Amino acid sequence: MTTDAHSVHTGDTSTGIPSAKLGMWLFLASEVMFFTGLLGATIVLRAGMAHWPRPGEDLSIPLAAMNTFILLSSSMTMAMSVAAVHQADSKKIRLFLLLTILLGTAFLGVKGYEYSIKFAHGHFPGTALFWDCYFTLTGLHGLHVLAGIIANLWILWLTFRPNFLRSDGHRVELSGLYWHFVDLVWIFLFPLLYLI
Amino acid sequence: MSYGKYFVIWIWLIVLLAAGTFISTLPISKTTAVGLILFVSLIKAILVALFYMHLKFERLVPLWIVAGFPFFLIGLATLLVFAGIVSG
């Protein structure tokens, strides 16, 4: 097994975990610490403030719930793309990757619309501590969504190369792990900023 | 996992999303609301990690340690949110 193409490209090691997968999990662990620090800062700042907007007071819960719906749906299509890799079904890999990319783009579109409303109301980073937290957390999360879209676009391009499944099939799973992580961060940002 | 099972997980995620959003509109105490909403979010996160990220099917202990650490931190952060918001 150690000499076949799959093993060479995924870098199986003595740990029994492909190096690329282990590397992705280590990266995600560092990403969790990155976001946990920011979330912690938001909580500490919130606890020290006399006024903090009530749920629905300044932010639109329906818009955010719709965006959560979009991102949860994109996680499903991403998982289905990984399943298609295991079935060696290139058409479905591409279809579900494309759906994931479109849903991710829709998420950013809704977020951009939300930002435009805030800007129209004069809410910018620097106008209040709440808005500093809001724009920092959602902005950095949005950049992560954008990075995930770019990664998936790159993999979509790779799927058209010959021998994709043998040489690069595992990349769909790696990109999927990252995409689900971005979804996980939003699962916590949504209640923290909008619901409680 | 089959496409059908991923779809069933998605249904659960959407039901939990609706439940969390609905709870935020209920006239209940802040402590109860925050606790319930964060509990619902934690279940959502666990569903994504176990099924979409395939942690349920990973039998390798090292990966569980690497993967488990961030989720331990998320759990810790959730507790901090709860304590911070309830007291704030």
Image: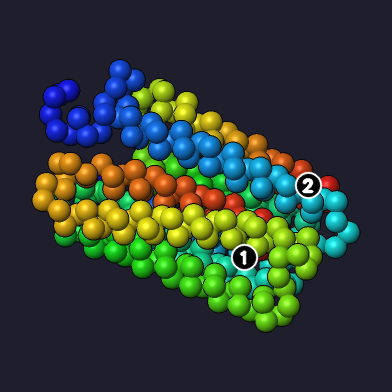
Occupied quadrant, residue A127: bottom right
Query: Residue furthest toward the bottom?
Result: A120
Residue B23 coordinates in the image, percent (x, y):
65, 61
- Judged by depth in the image, the label closer to the viewer, 1 or 2, is 2
Q: Quadrant of the N terminus of chain B?
A: top left
> In the depicted view, which residue is nearer to us: B77 or A136?
A136
Answer with left or right where residue A93 lies relative to residue B10: left
Q: Disc 2 residue type?
A: Val
Q: Residue at x 43, y 35 (%)?
A: A25
Above or below, comparing residue A145 to residue A64 in the picture: above
Q: Which residue is mark 2?
A: A44
CA distance for labels 1 and 2: 26 Å
Answer with left or right where residue A98 lies relative to residue A107: left
Q: Which residue is mark 1?
A: B22
- At mark 1, the secondary structure is helix
> In the depicted view, which residue is nearer to us: A109 or A63?
A109
Q: Chain of mark 2?
A: A
Residue A126 coordinates in the image, percent (x, y):
75, 65
Residue B62 coordinates in the image, percent (x, y):
41, 23
Dot 1 and dot 2 within a common chain: no
Q: Residue at x 24, y 63 (%)?
A: A95
